[in-house]
Image: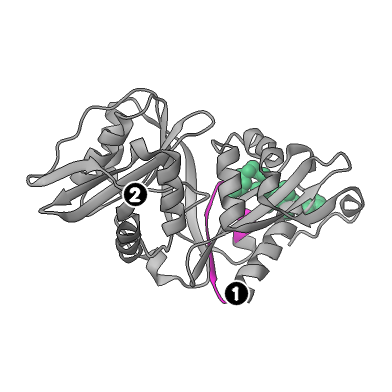
Amino acid sequence: MANTDAGILLQLKERALTPEDAAKLVPLSIEAGWNQMEADWTFMLQSGEGKGMTDRAGRFAACALIVPLGPAVSWISMVVTAKPWRRRGLGTRLLKDRIADVRAAGKVAGLDATEHGKPIYEALGFRPLWELSRWHVKRVPAKAALPPGVELRAMRRQELKAIAMIDKVLTGLEREHVLRHLYARAPGLAYVATEASRLRGYVLGRDGRFATQIGPIVATDDATARALAARAVASAPPPFILDVPDRHKGIQAWINEAGGEAQRHFWRMTLGDAPGLAEDRPIFALAGPELA
Ligand SMILES: CC(C)(COP(=O)(O)OP(=O)(O)OC[C@H]1O[C@@H](n2cnc3c(N)ncnc32)[C@H](O)[C@@H]1OP(=O)(O)O)[C@@H](O)C(=O)NCCC(=O)NCCS
C-alpha cells in the first residue's frame, strides 16, 4: 500500500471542502476529461462532504468526496488528483480518509471505479459487483416503441417524493435529494412511463460540460427503458452520454444503431456487503458514476 510522499505534505494544505469551493474544483474534473459542471460540484458538496489538498497558490491538487445515499450507503465520488501530483499517495490518502468517515457512520462505501481508480480501491478492500460502460451518442437515436398499454408523460415536481420511494425499492438507493436536484436542473428531461396510472419507469437527466447526461433510467422492462431514453434524447440537443450497466443489451443495441460508442468502462464496487446494490436491479442508466 502506498504511503503519501512525506515531502508533498509540506507543499500542500489539506482541508474540508465547502460548496463555495465548487468553481475552483472544476479544473480537476476538466483535466480528468469528465462532464461535471460547477453545479454538480456545488450539489455534491451541499448534500455531501469532502476533503481537498491545495497548493501554495490555492489551486486544488486532489480531492475525494462522499455523497450520502441513505442510512446504509455512502457514495465515494470525485476521487481525482491533478496530473502533476499523481502517484505520490494523495489519492490513497484522501480515499482512506473518506472510507474512515463512511465506516464511522456505520455505512457501506460504494463507488463506480474507472480503470485508474480500480487498482487503488481493490488494494483498500473494495470488490467489484458489476460493470458498466459510458456510451457517447452524437445524434438522436430512433424512437423506440412502447409496450402495449404503457404511456409516457412529463414528470411532475409534486410526484418526486413518491418516485423516490419507488426508486428506493427498485434500486436499493435512497436518493430523493439526487432526483430533486436533477429535476431542478433539467425538468425538460424528466419523464415517467405509466400503465393504468401505475409507474413503470422514469428518466431524469442534466446538462454537462460537453454532453447532456441521460440518467437515471429505471424501468420494469427493456422496452420501457428504451422508450424513456428516446423521449429524453428528443428533448435536448446532442451529444448525449448514458452510463449503462453491461447486462442491459437491449438499450445498448438501440444506442449502437444511432452510432453510439462505448468509450469508458466502470466497475461498480463496494467495501463490505450491500445486498441491495449487488442484485440485478432494473437500473438501465446511472445518474452518473459520481451519483450512483
Ligand atoms: C485515480 C487517481 C485519483 C489516483 O490518484 P493518485 O494521487 O495518483 O493516487 P496514489 O498516488 O495514491 O496511487 C496511484 C499510484 O501511485 C502509486 N504511489 C503512491 N504513492 C507513491 C509514492 N510515494 N511513490 C511511488 N508510487 C506511489 C500507488 O501505488 C499507485 O500505483 P498503481 O497505479 O500502480 O496502483 C488519479 O490517477 C486520477 O485522478 N485519475 C483520473 C481520475 C480518475 O480516474 N479517478 C478515479 C475515479 S474512480
Question: SS for tag 1?
Answer: loop
- Residue 4, percent from left and from top: 81, 57
Front one among 113 and 185: 185
User: What residue sits right under mark 2 in the picture?
Assistant: 157
Front one among 196 and 265: 196
Q: Examine the rendered structure and indicate whether residue 187 appears above or below residue 4.
A: above
Front one among 177 and 140: 177
Q: Check disc 1 and give the amino acid type.
A: Ala
> Mark 1 or 2, which is nearer the eye?
2
Q: Quadrant of the N terminus?
A: bottom right
Q: Residue at x 63, y 55 (%)?
A: 65
- Residue 282, percent from left and from top: 29, 56
User: What residue sits right under mark 1 in the picture?
Assistant: 105
Q: In the image, is 84 to the left or to the right of 76?
A: right
Q: In the image, is 182 to the left or to the right of 28?
A: left
Question: SS for tag 2?
Answer: helix
- Magenta segment: 105-121
Disc 2 residue crowd, few under 14, some 14–19, many 20+, Cα 10 Å: few
Q: In the image, is 110 to the left or to the right of 38?
A: left
